[in-house]
Image (cartoon, grey):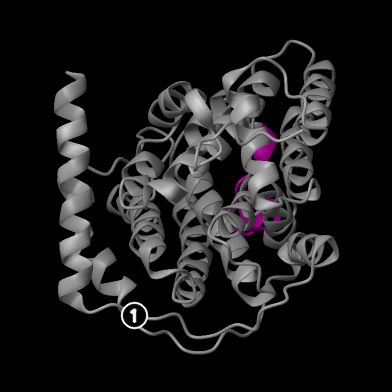
Amino acid sequence: MSMNCGDPTGCGGDLPACRELLYGGSKSFHAASLLLPATLRDPATALYAFCRVADDAIDGAGDSTAALEWIRRRLDLIYSGRPEDRAADRAFAAVVERHDIPRALPEALLEGFAWDAEGRRYATIQDLQCYAARVAGSVGVMMSLLMGQRDPRVLARASELGVAMQLTNIARDVGEDARAGRLYVPGDWLREAGIEAEAWLERPRFDARWQQPLERLLQQADLLYARAAEGIAWLPWRCRAGMHAARLLYAQIGAAVRENGCDSISVRARVSLGRKLALLPEALASALQWRGALTGQLVETRFLVDAVIAHRAPSVPLKAPPVPSRAEWLLQLFERLEREQLATRGSD
């Protein structure tokens, strides 16, 4: 059963509801998505919407096991081409069909949600990256598939970008997570800093001991952001600015955590609109740069890349993507921003 519905993005009339989920769930991802071409922005929005719905359903459920099984049944229907009568499900089913997304990728995401539901803790940074690979690395790989890129080396970098973003989220949300009874910071880092996890969770408070483990989290994220830039250089050039914007926006969240003295327990780090807009020139400049060869991969994300290889091995060798002239790039970007502005005015 085809889910195309005559729409070039494959998502049909379900996109407005998906956009609402995107804007309400992640302001940073929404901002970065505005730099993506519509042919990618719309299916990316559909992908995010289903991930958001699944996360909310499991996170807010009294019986998380039952909620997880319910989401898996919905995924069964999506992969059989008969999605439930819900905007996010229909839109995601169209994306799955059009972009040939292996089921192992959303299944990995759901496995990560299940780990959340059981309150799993992580003893080492490697254990934490196993979790981040599932809840965020899987999304990075799916995003690459939306861009038509299936080379294992690029997928490895995409998964690492997702891991970096998740590590940044964890560093930002320590206090919020603790008040919900959750703690993601690696246990061995806490012990080295003299923090006893159970006692601290009973009364979460910031003190100087937290600076060391949170700085270590941010340093690991920074390393992966730098590696991700290499993979972005291999994407279609129309996609590069948006992905660099996402990379830079999340790195700025980490910078805001540092500016707060790594106190993400009594205060939540935020990136102002002005700072977000100031990243636009850097994202554009990064999109025009050539980053060189791709080497190495996080062990914890390898299973995601292997899932794509097993599903359908890449048949086209990786080639350096064409780089447009700066004039051509800026002209097309301004045309797209103008269309966005006109559309926004029309909806007011």
Image location of residue 20, percent across then percent down: 41, 23
Residue positioned most to the top: 62
Q: What is the x, y in percent for residue 75?
A: 78, 31
Query: Could you tell me which quadrant the C terminus lies in?
Result: top left
Residue 216, given in percent of the width and then of the height, sits at: 51, 63
Q: Residue at x 51, y 24 (%)?
A: 14
Q: Which residue is mark 1?
A: 323
Query: Between 328 and 201, which is closer to the camera in this rendering?
Result: 328
Q: Is residue 330 above or below residue 58?
A: below
Residue found at x 62% / y 85%: 295
Q: Is residue 282 above or below residue 4?
A: below
- Is residue 233 inside the magenta stretch? no
Stretch of the chain drawn in magenta:
187-198
In the picture, measured across the screen, residue 223 lies left or right of residue 189, that is left
Quarter of the image where one finds residue 61: top right
Tell me if I can see residue 287 in this picture. Answer: yes
Q: Tag 1: residue type?
A: Val
